Amino acid sequence: MAKEEPLSTSKDLKELQKKLSLLVESIQNNSKVIAFMKSPVGQYLDRHPFMALTVLVFVALSAIPVGFFLLIVVLTSLAAFVGVILLEGLVISVGGLSLLCVLCGLSFVSLAVSGTIIVSYVVASSLLNYWFPPSQSPLGLWRGSTCPLPSVTPRSHP
C-alpha cells in the first residue's frame, strides 16, 4: 500500500504538469499575447524576467485595492445620487406642504374679505334706504318707475 501512493502521486503530478503546459501553450498562442510580446514593453519584459515577475505581482496585488477604490467610487456616486433624489423629494414635499398651508390661509382670508364686503354692501344699502327712503329718493323717482310725462289736455277751438 505504501508503494501505491508514490506512484499515484507522481502520476497526478505528471497529469498536472501536462495540463499546465497545455494552459501555458494556449496562453502563448493567444493573438493578444503575441501582439503584446512583439511590442517594446513585451520585449523588455521578455529580456528581464525579474522585472516581468515584479510587474505581474504588482498588478495582481494592486487589483484588490483598485477594485475597492472603484467600488467605493460607485457606491459613493450612488449614495450621492440617492441623496440628491431624497433631498429633492424632501424639498419638494416641504415646499408643497408650505404651499398648501399658504393656500388654505388665503382661502380663509378670501372668505373673510368677501364676507366683509357682502356685509358692508348690505349695511350700506340698508343705511341708504333708511336715510333716503324710496319715496324720497335723491332723484325724486320711485324705484322702477319711469319719468312722469306732462299731462296734455286737448284745447277746444272757438
Image (tube, rainbow, N blue to C red):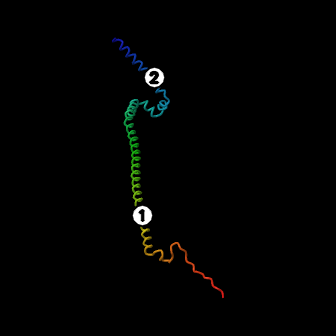
Q: Which residue is mark 1?
A: 115
Q: Quadrant of the C terminus?
A: bottom right
Under mark 2, the amino acid is: Leu
| Vertical arrangement, residue 32 with respect to residue 77, above or below | above
Q: Which one is closest to the eye, mark 1 or mark 2?
A: 1
Image disc number at residue 22:
2
Disc 2, SS: helix
Mark nearer the N terminus (1 vs 2): 2
Residue drawn at x 43%, y 21% as measured from the top left? 19
Residue 9 placement, left or right of 138: left
Q: Quadrant of the N terminus?
A: top left
Q: Is mark 1 in CB contact (under 8 Å) with mark 2?
A: no
User: Which residue is drawn at the image coordinates 40% and 62% (left, top)?
Assistant: 112
**Within-10-Å neighbours for mark 1: few <14, some 14–19, many 20+:** few
Q: Percent from the top left, x then y, of residue 71?
A: 39, 38
Relative to 157, is 10 above or below?
Answer: above
Crowd band around label 2 with a 10 angstrom C-alpha radius: few (<14), some (14–19), many (20+) = few
In this view, the residue in front, 79 or 113, is 113
Q: Does 6 sit above or below residue 74?
A: above
Of the pair 143 and 53, the residue shown nearer to us: 143
Q: CA distance from mark 1 to mark 2?
A: 97 Å
Q: Nearer the viewer, residue 112 or 8?
A: 112
Residue type highlighted by circle 1: Gly
Q: Residue furthest bottom?
A: 158
Q: Position of residue 3 (x, y in %)?
A: 35, 11
Q: Position of residue 63 (x, y in %)?
A: 39, 35
